[in-house]
Image (cartoon, rainbow, N blue to C red):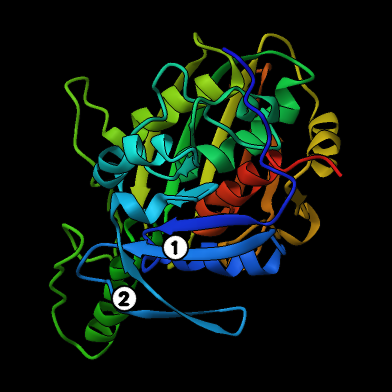
Amino acid sequence: MISAAPFPNRPLTVAVLGASGAVGQELLQLLEERNFPVSELRLLASARSAGSRCSWKGQELVVQETTAQAFEGVDLVLASAGGSVSKAWREAIVASGAVMVDNSSAFRMEDGVPLVVPEVNPSAAHQHQGVIANPNCTTILLSLALAPLASRRPLRRVVVSTYQSASGAGARAMDELRDLSRVVLDGGTPTSEVLPHSLAFNLFLHNSPLQSNGYCEEELKMVNETRKIMGIPDLRFTATCVRVPVLRAHSEAVNVEFHEPFSVEEARSLLASAPGVELLDDSAHNRFPMPTDVTGRDPVMVGRIRQDISEPNALEFWLCGDQIRKGAALNAIQIAELLLPSV
């Protein structure tokens, strides 16, 4: 595959596809916070959301209906409107000469489409053919912790259990969790309309479709995407994904087996200095990462690093990361930043 040229050395015309959603709103915030070089910002959404208004850098922008003409002259499309929407507009976006950084699962496993976590495999972003895929939220968070360990010793097997927040199902699921929690506290019976079960004071196995092998779609995303990002196609990997009553930060319990022993001290040192990772491993006070520690923040927090007492070549650890931020919007912006011309 031929390396793609970087963006032109000027402020860019940027379109946010799915601007009215939770991730879309976070993208707008991060474009401003990170001073991304924007000359013009176009907010695109469905006909239903067209006409709504968003504030950005002191301006009031009107959300436009997505059309092929809306991509004319655009340099970068940050897409977060779902796989069917990304598939529908891919041809028009690429034909316009724009690069699409896509947050859906539509293209992640497609040959020729880079799947990128900038702290892990940044060079892959430069091998795109108009589309770069943003990984699944749980995969992004996990890969930040796996990469520094894998750089020291090859991975043999990974076992993960996730504790995924309502934000992974979108803004409406977050609103429903708030509303149904009040219903329960008031003594009522919660009835869910967004999720298949009420998440208020409850948890359930991830609601993505079950596959023929008994794994749900979300679990297989983690398996396949981690293998692709890490460049280990035969990595032994299994996952169990659970939806929990947390608003917007995911957590993961991780067991990693190597081909030889890996000391806790060395792992702790590697993770403490890894980009995008913040270590919180205070055994003396039983203080480890919590969703509230990372909500609204960029780093993935890792802690409770310990020797697996059942396997001398394995380590256990725990991590938390903001699903909307590093698990989606921030990673997409960081991918786009990789394509900016070097100063």
Q: Residue at x 21, y 26 (%)?
A: 214
Residue 78 appears anywhere in the view: yes
Quadrant that contains the C terminus: top right
Residue 328 position within the rendered picture, expressed as x and y whole percent measured from the top left: 50, 51
From the viewer's perspective, is 295 left or right of 147?
Answer: left
Q: Residue at x 71, y 58 (%)?
A: 286
Image depth: mark 1 or mark 2 in front: 1
Q: Quadrant of residue 62?
A: bottom left
Structural distance between the alpha carbons of marks 1 and 2: 16 Å
Secondary structure beneath label 2: helix
Q: Which sits in the foreground, 341 or 115?
A: 341
From the viewer's perspective, is 283 left or right of 202?
Answer: right
Quadrant that contains the N terminus: top right
Q: Which sits in the foreground, 294 or 2?
A: 2
Q: Relative to 65, is 78 above or below?
A: above
Looking at the picture, which amino acid does disc 1 mark? Gly
Q: Residues within 10 Å of mark 1 (few under 14, many from 20)?
A: many
Q: Residue at x 43, y 25 (%)?
A: 223
From the viewer's perspective, is 102 left or right of 291?
Answer: left
Q: Name the residue furthest bottom.
A: 186
Q: Residues within 10 Å of mark 2 (few under 14, many from 20)?
A: some
Q: Which residue is mark 1?
A: 24
Could you say which disc has been placed on residue 175 in the image?
A: 2
- Tell me which numbered mark, 1 or 2, is placed earlier along the sequence: 1
